[in-house]
Amino acid sequence: MSALSEAQRFKQVQRVFQRTLAANIAVSTAKLIVGMLTGSLAMIADGFHSAMDASSNLIGMLAASIAAQPPDAEHPYGHRRFETLATLAIGGLLLVAAWEILTTAIDRLLHGGTIEVSPISFAVMLGTLMVNFGVVLYESSQARCLNSDVLRADVAHTRVDIFVSLSVILSLIFTELGIAWADTAVALLIVALIGRTAFAIVRQTSQVLADRAPLDPEAIQRVVASVPGVESVSRVRSRGPADAVYADVEVRVQPATTAERASAIADEIEARLKESLQGVTEVQVQVQPHYATPPDRATMVRAVADALGLAVHEVTEIVTGRGIALEMHVEVSPLLTLAAAHEQVSLFEARLRAAMPEVCEVITHIEPASRQADVVLHSGHAALLREQALQVARHAYPEAHWSDANVRTIAGGYAVMLRCTLSGEMSVQEAHAIAEQVEMRIRSEIPLVQRVTIHTEPA
């Protein structure tokens, strides 16, 4: 059922209520008619209880119809709370039914009354018991599949009917044996069962309306803390019914994290919470800078570049006798003149030194940014370059498996991409060193190749 949309889900809930409504109307009518004809207070009480079941079905149908409506200007968070209100109303109806039965039982104790026990009384109660049992099984399975609080409340309501019907049958047996007060005693027992169920429903729905947290904060925190880029989790909150939980999370990230990366972190937090915790439908993530840890220089470099509309890659830290030097490739618009590009990158370098006083030197390599997607070549010449690159790679490091070579055109020549499969026990540093050596060999032995990219992966 998880693939159903909200509208489809609520339509299914309405269909469940329509079917149970028909069953409850038939059951309550039979109980009330026979109870009034025989004078059985317990049967009349049970008939009123079944009538309350039918009323709760109508309330549930109306609530499902309203809750299925999409968010609007007056209800920007949707109409799901109407389902919770309907659940609360069902609990209220149970309390009203309990009160009516209680007052009738007290009147019977004070003024007395006669009861006529007949075979039809037993037949009606046994028949309604079977119907109630079937309704409980059906509604319970649908409540689980559709994850509906109002259906769960109605299941609890109907489940009481089974115990009530058993109690009424017991009262009829005692009455037949000459124990007249058993009918009133069973009616009082029914009141206790109804009241217990009603208070449980009212308590649960009141907690939802009061925004009691439906999820364990520690469980939310564990999921959020596992997302890369999250330095710490400063606040987690949740509210709403079990099938429509809203989570509110505040996390700390590196101060120089760009807006694009912060958005990606927030998206990942939302995806993991929805995947890991059942019922989460919406996640609000607030991202704040975290100043308690040393800054990530590569992240700060990208943040400064983003502010100037530049792109950087291959940011390398170099330890020198005078301090930290940063080397990187900076991509600028290919339409800029050399003077304009140099002026833009000089401003970038100045801002980096101001942001990171510990950096003694910034070394930049200016490159034109690509404005169009690279296209893999399939010509005969490209096939020859692919084979040559593979031969050089296999000769340079025969222990690896080299494959999936492709060739693209770039300014001044060609770019080659290779896939290299190495031992999974090898360190990343070793794999990177092998890739760099092979890249240099390919560029030196095939002059037309200006750029080589090697993707290393474990066997």
Image (cartoon, rainbow, N blue to C red):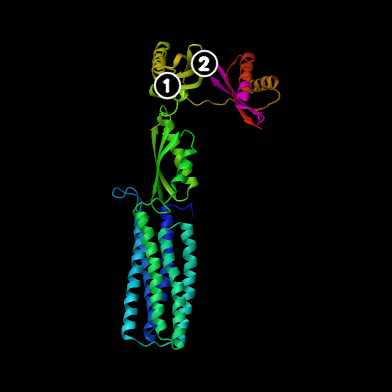
| Residue 310 tag number | 1
Residue 371 visible (yes or no): no
Residue that mark 2 sits on: 319
Evaluate whether residue 267 shows in this view: yes
Q: Residues within 10 Å of mark 2 (few under 14, many from 20)?
A: few
- Residue 409 colored in magenta in the image: yes
Q: Secondary structure at mark 2?
A: strand
Q: Residues within 10 Å of mark 1 (few under 14, many from 20)?
A: some
Specify which label sits upstream in the sequence, 2 or 1. 1
Quadrant in which the C terminus is drawn: top right
Q: Position of residue 304 (x, y in %)?
A: 40, 22
- Residue 262 found in image quarter: top left
What residue is shown at x 41% (from left), y 34% (from top)?
252
Residue 442 is situated, as x and y percent measured from the top left of the image, at: 63, 17
Front-most of residues 442 and 315: 315
| Cα–Cα gap, marks 2 and 1 | 25 Å
**As drawn, is 266 to the left or to the right of 415?**
left
Above or below, comparing residue 94 to residue 263 in the picture: below
Q: Is residue 125 left or right of 435 when viewed as pictured?
A: left
Query: Callout 1: helix, strand or loop?
Result: loop
Which of label 2 and label 1 is nearer to you? Answer: 2
State which quadrant residue 235 falls in. Answer: top left
Q: Which residues are magenta?
A: 404-433
Q: Residue 409 at x, y = what percent?
A: 55, 21
Q: Residue furthest left?
A: 74
Quarter of the rendering containing residue 287: top left
Q: Is residue 403 above or below residue 150?
A: above
Dot 2 amino acid type = Val
